[in-house]
Image (tube, helix red, strand yellow):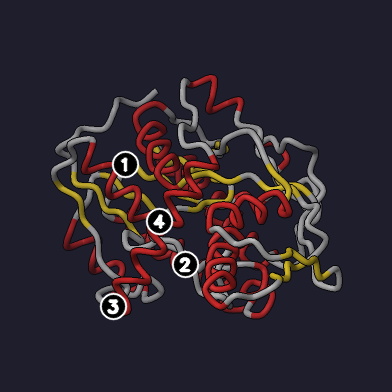
Amino acid sequence: MVDALDRSARVYIAGHRGLAGSAVWRRFEQAGFTDLVGAASSELDLRDRDATFAFLHETKPDVVIDAAARVGGILANDTYPAEFLSDNLRIQLNVMDAANEVCVDRLLFLGSSCIYPKFAEQPIREDSLLTGALEPTNDAYAIAKIAGIMQVQSTRKQYGRHWISAMPTNLYGPGDNFDPQNSHVLPALIRRFHEAKIDGLDEVVLWGTGTPRREFLHVDDLADAVLFLLDHYDDASTINVGVGTDVTIRELAELVARTVGYEGAIVQDVSKPDGTPRKLLDVSRLSELGWQARVGLVDGVGATYEWFVRQHAAARL
């Protein structure tokens, strides 16, 4: 086992303006870390290898948290697979190769639960990785994340670094992307039901049958898990981060509708794809280490909607 992180260590959070990265930044500030480093994408394009190496050589972090990624929902993943594969591979390779060159001993790579086979046994254990075919609507993104896990493991093996990888389930919370074209399911539903209420629409149409089951982790819980793992976990095997329970997409839509105050009908468009039928992570390994999620879905969705409304109000000023 490794020692807990020194709170005075220099910590570089790649992707610190994104959903996960911004939550990690907040959590580390709360925990008393005094030397956090970040660079917005406008300041540093992590796809640029030379620029990424120069940044790591200049900042010389003690710890790297790779929360940087090109992300999106089913539509975005299915429409732009080449970019999702290429961009994410380059980001990971550049960050990790540069971190290794400057001798960063502690690194955490954030992946995604989409790395697991489409029909993996539920709940999905970490050893399900590479045991079956991926969900075709986001296989390019999944392959990139699998490559990231392999890079962590390879670097540990060859250089003896204390690098780890964590696979969170579906994330949501403040800072999420609510764009109607490329957001994930929960923020997309929040925006859709909010606008339907404002516009007085009689119905909201959902893609698919509504029967697929999904697990949702509040991003503040993920950030807490990131700190916990860096303090307590040191193993080549990736580790799942989730809540251990799931809901159907239909149940999620009904919860969002109640939260928003939308009273119209919810209609399923069964001509549209469902994606993976179920994706519930087995979080027993993380639970045995002593960590569990704290934010319930009802409270989390409520707080996320409040944040969304505040952001929309501010944007109109």
Q: Would you call the spot at circle 2 few (<14 residues within 10 Å), some (14-19), or many (20 or more)?
A: many
Residue drawn at x 42%, y 36% is 225
Residue 7 location (% of width, % of height) = 18, 35
Q: Height in image: 267 above or below 106? A: below
Q: Nearer the viewer, residue 296 or 6?
A: 296
Mark 3 vs 4, N-terminal side: 3
Q: Find the residue positioned furthest to the right.
A: 271
Give the label on residue 42, or none. Answer: 3
Q: Would you call the spot at circle 1 few (<14 residues within 10 Å), some (14-19), or many (20 or more)?
A: some
Q: Quadrant of the N terminus?
A: top left
The Cα atoms of the two marked residues, 2 and 4, are separated by 14 Å
Give the label on residue 177, or none. Answer: 2
Residue drawn at x 57%, y 35% is 243
Give the label on residue 105, or none. Answer: 1
Q: Would you call the spot at circle 3 few (<14 residues within 10 Å), some (14-19), or many (20 or more)?
A: few
The mark lying in front, picked from 3 and 4, is: 4
Q: Which residue is mark 4?
A: 306
Q: Tell whether label 1 touches label 4 (CB within 8 Å).
A: no
Q: Height in image: 163 above or below 313? A: above
